[in-house]
């Protein structure tokens, strides 16, 4: 089963960029090769600019075709293809809903700092049990939605486990972490990092060593 978009880089870049500029921001889709590497890989980047000072959520909706998703896309919306589905990702207020589509999740509120220009980096991860990341942190609030398998997130405060059908994981900006795929099934997740546009989504973390809490999960 393919777990990445099949559209060519040139075509997806053109469609995403023109649509994003029309809505007041630029959106960039990644090439399939970039989305196929092990671990978390960026599948789209949307430059959102300044955000309203109101609680914001990550809305996840799916559509039967890319054209349908593009037609339903509003401000701060991004259309991507991941895990054999067409997704509309939107950063909006709690009661926002798109036209049509199937609502998958609403995640938040996202704990944003005041002011600044923001970028939404969307990632997909497909990892086998036992896969473990380095110690790192997000340059802004993050959210992780698990479609299959299980992932264990260790931080200085303890551990959290994300499972298919369970609660999404919300991750604070600047929180040191290490993620481990656990269980017996391939873990497939979609991730949002809403970060300052002047920084990459992921930055190194120092001064903390995991205790191996996820090894017993």
Image (spheres, rainbow, N blue to C red):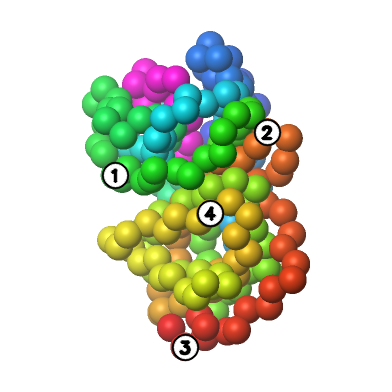
Dot 1 and dot 3 residues touching (CB under 8 Å): no
14 falls in the magenta region = no
Figure quadrant of the C terminus? bottom left
Instruction: Report which quarter residue 179 is drawn in.
Output: bottom right
78 falls in the magenta region = yes
- Residue 130 percent location from the top left of the image: 54, 79
Tell me the SS state at disc 3: helix
Q: Over which residues does the magenta segment extend?
A: 67-81
Dot 1 and dot 2 residues touching (CB under 8 Å): no
Please tell me which residue is depicted at 56% across the width and 70% down the height of the picture: 155
Tell me the SS state at disc 2: loop
- Residue 15 percent location from the top left of the image: 55, 21
Considering every residue shown, the one lying at the far top of the view is 22
- Residue 112 percent location from the top left of the image: 52, 40
Residue to which mark 1 is pinned: 104
Q: Which mark is residue 197?
A: 2
Residue sitting nearer the eye, 185 or 165: 165
* Res. 93 visible in picture: yes
* CA–CA distance in space, label 2 to label 3: 37 Å
Tell me the SS state at disc 1: strand
Residue sitting nearer the eye, 62 or 2: 62
Residue 22 higher or lower than 100, as above or below: above
Horizontal side, residue 161 vs residue 106: left or right: right
Residue to which mark 4 is pinned: 172
């Amino acid at each position: 089963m393919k777990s990445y978009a099949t559209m060519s880089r040139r075509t997806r870049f053109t469609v995403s960029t023109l649509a994003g500029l029309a809505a007041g921001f630029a959106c960039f889709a990644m090439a399939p090769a970039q989305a196929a590497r092990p671990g978390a890989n960026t599948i789209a980047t949307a430059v959102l600019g300044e955000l309203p000072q109101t609680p914001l959520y990550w809305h996840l909706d799916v559509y039967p075709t890319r054209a349908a998703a593009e037609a339903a896309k509003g401000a701060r919306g991004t259309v991507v293809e991941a895990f054999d589905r067409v997704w509309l990702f939107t950063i909006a207020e709690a009661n926002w809903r798109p036209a049509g589509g199937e609502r998958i999740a609403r995640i938040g509120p996202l704990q944003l700092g005041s002011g600044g220009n923001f970028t939404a980096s969307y990632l997909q991860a497909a990892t086998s049990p036992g896969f473990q990341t380095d110690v790192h942190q997000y340059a802004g609030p993050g959210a992780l939605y698990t479609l299959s398998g299980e992932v264990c997130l260790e931080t200085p405060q303890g551990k959290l486990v994300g499972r298919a059908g369970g609660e999404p994981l919300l991750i604070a900006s600047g929180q040191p972490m290490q993620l481990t795929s656990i269980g017996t099934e391939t873990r497939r997740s979609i991730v949002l990092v809403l970060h300052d546009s002047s920084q990459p989504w992921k930055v190194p973390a120092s001064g903390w060593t995991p205790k191996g809490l996820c090894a017993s999960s």
